[in-house]
Amino acid sequence: MPTRTARTAWNGGLEDGSGQVELSSSKVGTYDVSFPKRAADEAGGTTSPEELIAAAHSSCFAMQLSAVIAEAGGTPQSLEVTADVSLGPDPSGGFRLTGIALKVVGEVDGLDAAGFEKAAEAAKQTCPVSKALTGVTITLDASLG
C-alpha cells in the first residue's frame, strides 16, 4: 500500500507565526495555516489540522461505509458525510481534539433505516482513520435521506 505525504513550512512563533501545508503526494494544493486562526471561530481563509483531519475522516468513512453497505447486500446510491472535529484545552496542558461528530445521510437500495445505521456503525469502527483516532470520542448520526 502507498504512503502519502504532506509538508508544512512554518515561520515564526506560535502566536505570530504562520505557515503553508502542501499536499505533496497529490500536488492538489498548498494551504495557509496559522495558530490564531486555528483557535478562532472563523478560519479566515486558512485551514487547520482539524479541518484536514475532518476531510480525511469524512472521505475515509464514506469509502468504508460504501463497502460495508455492499457487504450487507445493499447498493449505495449516494452518501453525504460531514465530520466536525473540535479542538479544545487539554486538562494536562496545551490543546487536544475534544471530539469528532460524524453525520451521514444516505440513499441506499436494499437496506432499511436499521440496516443502514448498523452499516454506518460498523464503518465507523473499521474505517482506518477512525482506528487512528481512537483517543478521541467519535459520535455518529446516520439516516436515510
Image: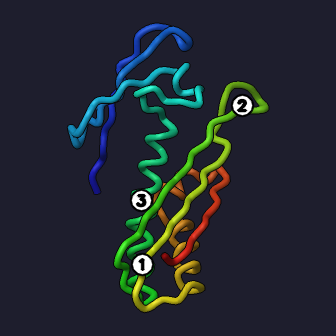
Counting the numbered discs, the total is 3
- Between the residue at mark 3 and the residue at mark 2, the CA separation in whole angstroms equals 27 Å
Asked whether disc 3 touches disc 2, contact meaning CB atoms under 8 Å apart, the reply is no
Of 83 and 57, which appears nearest the observer?
83
Of 2 and 66, which appears nearest the observer?
66
49 left or right, relative to 40: left
Type of the residue with mark 3: Cys
Categorize mark 3 by other alpha carbons within 10 Å: few (<14), some (14-19), many (20+): some
4 left or right, relative to 134: left
User: Which label lies toward us, 1 or 2?
Assistant: 1
55 left or right, relative to 132: left
- Mark 3, residue position: 60
- Mark 1, residue position: 107
- On residue 89, which mark appears? 2
Q: Is residue 30 above or below residue 141?
A: above
**Residue 19 placed where, x, y %?**
39, 19
Identify the residue at image location x=21%, y=37%: 27
**Residue 115 placed where, x, y %?**
55, 86
